[in-house]
Amino acid sequence: MDDIFAARLMSTSLCTVTPDTLVEEAAKTMMDSDIGSVLVVDEENHLEGILTSTDFVQIVAERQPKDETPVSAYMSRDPITTTAQTPIRDVADSMIEHGFHHLPVVDGDDLIGIITTTDFAAYLSQARTPSPT
């Protein structure tokens, strides 16, 4: 696995929102796209944060008026990221260490992809030969 890099597993079809997007709209985007997070970017596609399904637990628990609350109120700011050239073992270690299910992939300041636990599962299901039954 040391010769396999983040670029091979990352998704490049990204769902992004701005910091001003309302959480209701972000939730609808996540549900419509069947994804567990949206990436929060500025006008230049620079990563500003990430909003995950876990964040919605806090939103519901605090009972904030969903139609008036922007994503910026709940997103994780300055998220930990990786690069396309990072070995996937290091990516997995970082995700486990921090308890993440989503890790944005950047090239300098530019957002280029995301790696999720689903990406790892899909890769492993393709990479391993099934055990004999």
Image (cartoon, rainbow, N blue to C red):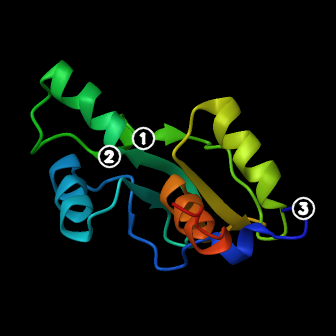
Q: Position of residue 70 (x, y in %)?
A: 27, 45
What x and y, as percent, mark residue 17?
36, 63
Any mark on residue 2, and which? 3
The residue wearing badge 1 is 75
**Label 3 to label 2, Cα distance in Å?**
36 Å
Residue at mark 1 to residue at mark 2: CA–CA distance: 6 Å
Q: Residue at x 55, y 78 (%)?
A: 12
Disc ID at residue 90: none
- The answer to whether the residue labelled 1 contacts the one labelled 2, judged by CB atoms less than 8 Å apart, is yes
- Image position, residue 38 (x, y; %): 39, 58
Looking at the rendered structure, the kind of residue marked 2 is Val
Work out whether residue 16 or residue 93 is closer to the camera in this orientation and state it: 93
Left or right position of 90 against 77: right
Figure check: 60 above or below 132: above
Circle 3 crowding by C-alpha within 10 Å: few under 14, some 14–19, many from 20: few
Asked if residue 111 can be seen in this view, the reply is: no
